[in-house]
Image (cartoon, rainbow, N blue to C red):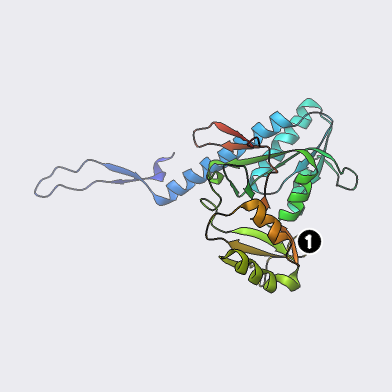
Amino acid sequence: MSFRGWLGVAKLLPGSSRRRPLVVTASPKTNTRVAVNMAEEAKKLAAYAAVDNHVQNNQVVGVGSGSTIVYAVDRLAARVRQEKMNIICVPTSFQARQLIVQHGLMLSDLDRHPELDVTIDGADEVDADLTLIKGGGGCLTQEKIVAGCARHFVVIADYRKDSKALGQQWKKGVPIEVVPMAYVPVSRRIVRLFGGEANLRMAVSKAGPVVTDNSNFILDWKFERPHNWKDVNSAIKMIPGVVETGLFVAMAERVYFGMEDGRVQVRDAPID
């Protein structure tokens, strides 16, 4: 860290010419920058470990969405070049498609490759049972479809996404993709059934709501207490107008967490 990243303070002691010892503290900006760099390095570690352990030659790979996936695609492209691998990639979003194309990887879709060997994706939060909240980036429906078509579904995340119970780390709620005309009755029904609040996700850089790759809206359901997530997921999906939920229950078989100390922690799904 450069000297500019630190703040030094020296003051005269009262009634003397002696100076107080130099007190060196990190500025708030420095702390934030260090935390961000640490999280990014953790994402990279998790992504590299997953790609190295689960991707082999002549496979069809589902490519997830989000900031952690950028590192996974970087590593996948490097291995394809270095090892002369034959890898076909199926994206979960427009972002994933662009990453595949930009890295010169072979692009396909579920029409041509409906069965995948492995899908690697990120998560907004992972609980002790490997139940996931996904959809912070709005790609939950296509992510769940691609994950469901894979023989193996592997998740990569940094240490901030690890929770004993959903809601401990991720405070933005469960994303739920809905048909636009149904967002009001769906939100009201969810609140009646399970409490909390369900809010229409609004865009940041444009007026109006967020629109998914499927031309739908997203509700963010902020729940107030723990639930049986399998039952909740099934009940919400039965509401007319709901396309998909961001609850991924009993889908992930392994999660790689990049840790603050440079390790990669691996957690496997519990055996029933």
Picture residue at 48% right of the left edge, 47% below the top:
33
In the foreground, 119 or 80: 119
In the picture, residue 70 is in which quadrant?
A: top right
Residue with the mark numbered 1:
214
Residue 143: percent from left, percent from top:
74, 50
Query: Quadrant location of the N terminus?
Result: top left
In the picture, residue 113 is in which quadrant?
A: top right
Residue with the most extreme right position = 112
Q: Is residue 4 visible?
A: yes
Residue 64: percent from left, percent from top:
72, 46
Q: Is residue 4 left or right of residue 249?
A: left
Query: Quadrant location of the C terminus?
Result: top right
Q: Is residue 236 left or right of residue 58?
A: left
Q: Amino acid at mark 1?
A: Asn
Q: Is residue 257 left or right of residue 213?
A: left
Q: From what the image shows, is residue 151 above or below residue 91?
A: above
Q: From what the image shows, is residue 196 above or below residue 47?
A: below
Residue 67: percent from left, percent from top:
64, 47
Residue with the most extreme left position = 15
